[in-house]
Amino acid sequence: MTLFEKIIAREIPADIVFEDEHCLAFRDIHPQAPTHVLLVPKRPIPRLGAATPADHALLGHLLLKAGDVARALGLDATGFRVVINHGPDGGETVPHLHIHLLGGRPLAWPPG
């Protein structure tokens, strides 16, 4: 089980900000912005590049929920960033697809 699967199963505690039948959103324990939330699908997909056409609806659901969570956290007024990392060079540290939702301060470009 990945770290995120353990959080979904409530084997590891997390500061959960949203949950439905398809995904869970919780605060990152090493935030890179004042607001840094991770959205993870409950059905594990190792990474974006491993998604298949069967994952189409779940991927769309995750993006829509990222917007909903951003609004619920008050980020939509000033803006936010959505990041999906893939592989070591992309910054992936957990092999379970997840969306980083960052906001609460101006975010520089390019990142990293």
Image: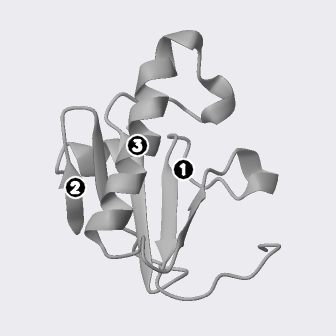
x 38%, y 64%: residue = 70
- Gap between marks 1 and 2 measured at Cα: 20 Å
Q: Position of residue 104 (x, y in %)?
A: 46, 85
- Residue 94: mark in rendering: 1
Q: What's the residue type where badge 2 is placed?
A: Phe
Q: Nearer the viewer, residue 111 or 60?
A: 60
Query: Which quadrant would residue 12 be assigned to in this image?
Result: bottom left
- Gap between marks 3 and 1 measured at Cα: 22 Å
Quarter placement of the N terminus: top left
Q: What kind of element bears circle 2?
A: strand
x 42%, y 59%: residue = 38
- Gap between marks 2 and 3 measured at Cα: 13 Å
Q: Nearer the viewer, residue 40 or 78?
A: 78
Vertical placement of residue 25 versus 70, above or below: above
Can residue 100 be seen at all in this image of the molecule? yes
Q: What's the residue type where badge 1 is placed?
A: Val
Residue topped by disc 2: 18
Q: Earlier along the polypeptide chain: callout 3 or callout 1?
A: 3
- In this rendering, which labeled residue sits more in front, label 1 or label 2? 2
Q: Earlier along the polypeptide chain: callout 2 or callout 3?
A: 2
Q: What kind of element bears circle 1?
A: loop
Q: What kind of element bears circle 3?
A: helix
Q: What's the residue type where badge 3 is placed?
A: Leu
